[in-house]
Image (tube, rainbow, N blue to C red):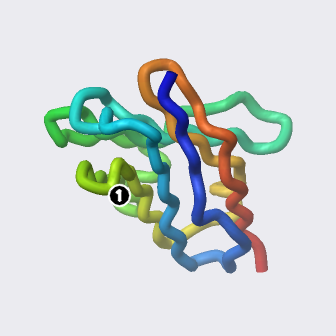
């Protein structure tokens, strides 16, 4: 089974930016749809964004215009560029492909 590793999380002030990375153990991102999900304390995991194998993208309404998902097939890496961050974006962020999830990376937006 493919191994996924997220990185790039941290503490940022409201209005700030972060770029999350999701590295895969195999060259699969050009084949499968890759998604980013997040789970805030006390809440269920929710969908954030996905990039299809064709390159098309889809976002949850709350992040449209602020987050951008992209991929680098040569590096087996998918990115989530997050800008204009809000306190409600605070969560553990996970990438997922073909039913597998990584261990997650914590994003905290606070002043």
Residue situated in front as seen by the camera: 48 or 74: 74
Callout 1: helix, strand or loop? strand
User: Where on the picture, by quarter, is residue 43?
Assistant: top right
Image quadrant where residue 24 sits: top left
Tell me if residue 106 comes above or below residue 15 in the rendering.
above
Question: Which quadrant: the C terminus?
Answer: bottom right
Residue 74 in the image: above or below residue 101: below
Task: Determine which quarter of the picture holds residue 27.
Answer: top left
- Residue 30 at x, y = what percent? 22, 37
Using the image, determine if residue 42 lies above or below residue 109. Answer: above
Residue farthest left in this picture:
54
Q: Residue at x 73, y 73 (%)?
A: 11
Residue 15 image point, x, y percent? 57, 78
Residue 70 lies, in percent from the top left, at 30, 54
Taking depth in this image into account, of 9 and 28 the one nearest to the observer is 28
Residue drawn 58% across and 51% down? Answer: 6
Is 98 in front, or is 69?
98
Residue corresponding to mark 1: 68
On the rendered structure, is 17 left or right of 27? Answer: right
The tally of labels here is: 1
Apparent side of residue 110 relative to residue 80 in the rendered image (left or right): right
Q: Above or below — where is 104 with respect to 14?
A: above
């Amino acid at each position: 089974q493919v191994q996924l590793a997220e990185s790039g999380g941290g503490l940022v002030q409201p209005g700030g930016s972060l770029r999350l990375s999701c590295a895969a153990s195999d060259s699969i991102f050009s084949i499968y749809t890759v998604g980013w999900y997040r789970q805030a304390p006390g809440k269920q995991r929710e969908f954030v964004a996905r990039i299809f194998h064709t390159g098309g993208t889809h976002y949850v309404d709350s992040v449209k215009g602020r987050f951008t998902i992209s991929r680098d097939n040569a590096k087996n890496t998918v990115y989530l560029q997050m800008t204009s961050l809000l306190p409600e974006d605070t969560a553990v962020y996970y990438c997922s492909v073909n039913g597998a999830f990584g261990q997650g990376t914590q994003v905290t937006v606070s002043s």
